[in-house]
Amino acid sequence: MGRAGLRRLLIAGLFVAVGTGLWYSQEAEYRDSLSWMGVTTWESPTPLSLHRVLRNDGYLVGWSDLRVNPLWVSYWLNDAGSSRIGERPDFQRDWRTLWPVSTDSYRGSGYDRGHLAPNYAIASVYGREAQRQTFLMSNMSPQRPRLNRQLWQRLEEVVMDDFVPRFGTLQVITGPIYPQDFLDGVFRRVGFTQVPEAFYKILVVPSDTPRVLAFIMPQEVSGNEPLDRFLVSVDEIEARTGLDFFPNLPPAAETRLEGGINQRGWALQAVARRPGRFQ
């Protein structure tokens, strides 16, 4: 290679390096904008906790190629006022998942395609394109109908209709919980997707005096249980998932927020038995 060719190669390499750096910086900024105290990561890297972060309009997905399912989904909600929600989009396959998860992968399984980033809330805050992206199969997880259509749906309504207007802004982190012994659930799959035994949802009010409320809901529910029956600490969710939800949280604040259950200020009991909109 001559001197001119080497110069062109070096210039091209410089453009690639600068472009990659700008892309990484923009991606990191976008991820941080959808996270409070850092993007969810693992307590310690193991095959069961490793994941890739998939970026979408309005929400992030921590995707596990081993589970063929998300480990977590994170999004921010704010009081959008009276937004008009478009018609329900069609489900879509996500080309970013290594294993093929098609729109009919759950057919005949007895499980619903359960949204993790919810259609209504994301559409209200982020608009129509973000709503379409909530129908990507990478945002779905197998849920029993009584959980998906009743208990889980009731919690999503309370979050958007009561907690967001009360506090103005919330971060929500949600996802599946699997058996801690991988072999216990390795063959419980819908297509390629491993079936969770439960689901969690963590609600954060980011402020100088932050509040946290967390839930674990098992697959086998009747659907009409009071929501406050399923309150847990964030520490319990981290113990069952192997994830660290707020990696930049100072140790003292972590102990205070994650170690117990504090309902003060949420007024959860007033809405815990409210029937769902579609029941």
Image (spheres, rainbow, N blue to C red):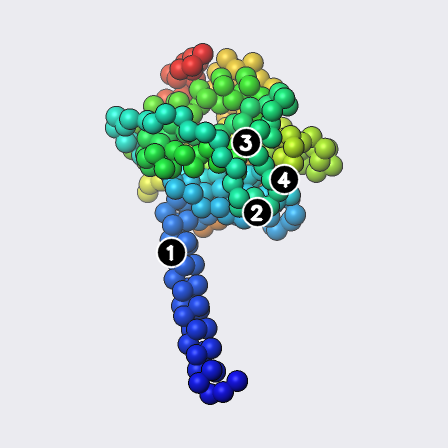
**Residue at 52% of width from left, 85% of height from top?**
1
View extreme (bottom): residue: 3
Q: Rounded to the nearest whole Å, what is the CA distance between mark 1 and mark 3?
A: 31 Å
Ranked by sequence position, the earlier of labels 1 and 3 is 1
The spot of residue 121 in percent (x, y) is 37, 30
Q: Label 2 near label 3: C-beta < 8 Å?
A: no
Q: Residues within 10 Å of mark 2 (few under 14, many from 20)?
A: many
Q: Secondary structure at mark 3?
A: loop
Q: Label 3 near label 1: C-beta < 8 Å?
A: no
Instruction: Kindly identify which residue carries mark 4.
Output: 67
Ranked by sequence position, the earlier of labels 2 and 4 is 2
Ranked by sequence position, the earlier of labels 1 and 2 is 1
Q: Secondary structure at mark 1?
A: helix
Amino acid type of the residue that numbered disc 1 sits on in the rendered structure: Gln
Amino acid type of the residue that numbered disc 4 sits on in the rendered structure: Arg
Q: Rounded to the nearest whole Å, what is the CA distance between mark 3 and mark 4?
A: 17 Å
Q: Label 4 near label 3: C-beta < 8 Å?
A: no
Q: Is residue 192 left or right of residue 216?
A: right
Ranked by sequence position, the earlier of labels 1 and 4 is 1
Instruction: Kindly identify which residue carries mark 2.
Output: 51
